[in-house]
Amino acid sequence: MIRQNIWLIPALAMLAFLPTTTLQANVTDGTASYYGDRFDGRRTASGVRFDKNALTAAHRTLEFGTRVSVTNKANGRSVEVVINDRGPFVRGRTIDLSKAAAREIGMLGRGVAPVRLEIVDSGGPSWPAGKTPALADAERVLMDLF
């Protein structure tokens, strides 16, 4: 078992030298998509049930509970959503919106839209007490590997 994971030692050593500032920008541009009706009522990664009529979204790295303003760059319409799930899992997509949020910014017809994301309020500390942001980010990377 130890020999199989011997590559972790140099990987952890390299992660120790990451800068100690948060890597998540407050404003980013990307592409949004939205959840279809078939996900309504299923549990999200945060443990709550998905409600297509709530103003929620999925993001790969933002903390659960983070409030994000999402602006459709094509028409200027905005909506504020709360992150409660992980995703999207399609290359090139930045955020998955609930159907209600997608309706608010006018993207139901096309299904995807170029958007600007702005963090309004963090869901809490982005790392547990006593840990640097670099260590918290390194742990997330390692968790994604397994």
Image: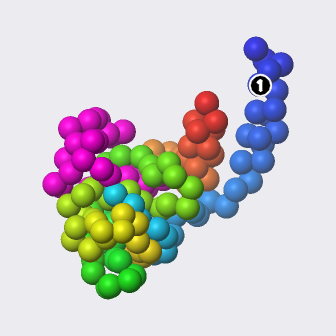
- As rendered, which of 34 and 134 lies closer to the eye? 34
- Image position, residue 75 (x, y; %): 32, 85
Q: Residue 103 location in percent, x, y?
A: 22, 67
Horizontal side of 93 relative to 113 (left or right) equals: right
68 or 34: nearer the viewer = 34
Residue 92 placement, left or right of 34? right
**Is residue 29 visible in the rendered structure shown here?**
yes
In reply to whether residue 89 is colored magenta, the answer given is no
Residue at image mark 1: 5
Q: Position of residue 39 (x, y in %)?
A: 28, 42
Instruction: Looking at the picture, tell me which residue is in the foreground, 145 or 88.
Output: 88
Mark 1 belongs to which amino acid? Asn
- Residue drawn at the location 20% of the way across and 38% of the way down: 41
Q: Which residues are magenta?
A: 35-63
Q: Toward which corner of the image does residue 116 lie, by quadrant?
A: bottom left
Q: Where is residue 125, by image quadrant?
A: bottom left
Compared with residue 51, is residue 49 higher up or lower down, i.e. above or below?
A: above
Report helix, strand or loop for mark 1: loop
Q: Residue at x 58, y 39 (%)?
A: 144
Q: Give the quarter of the figure containing the N terminus.
A: top right
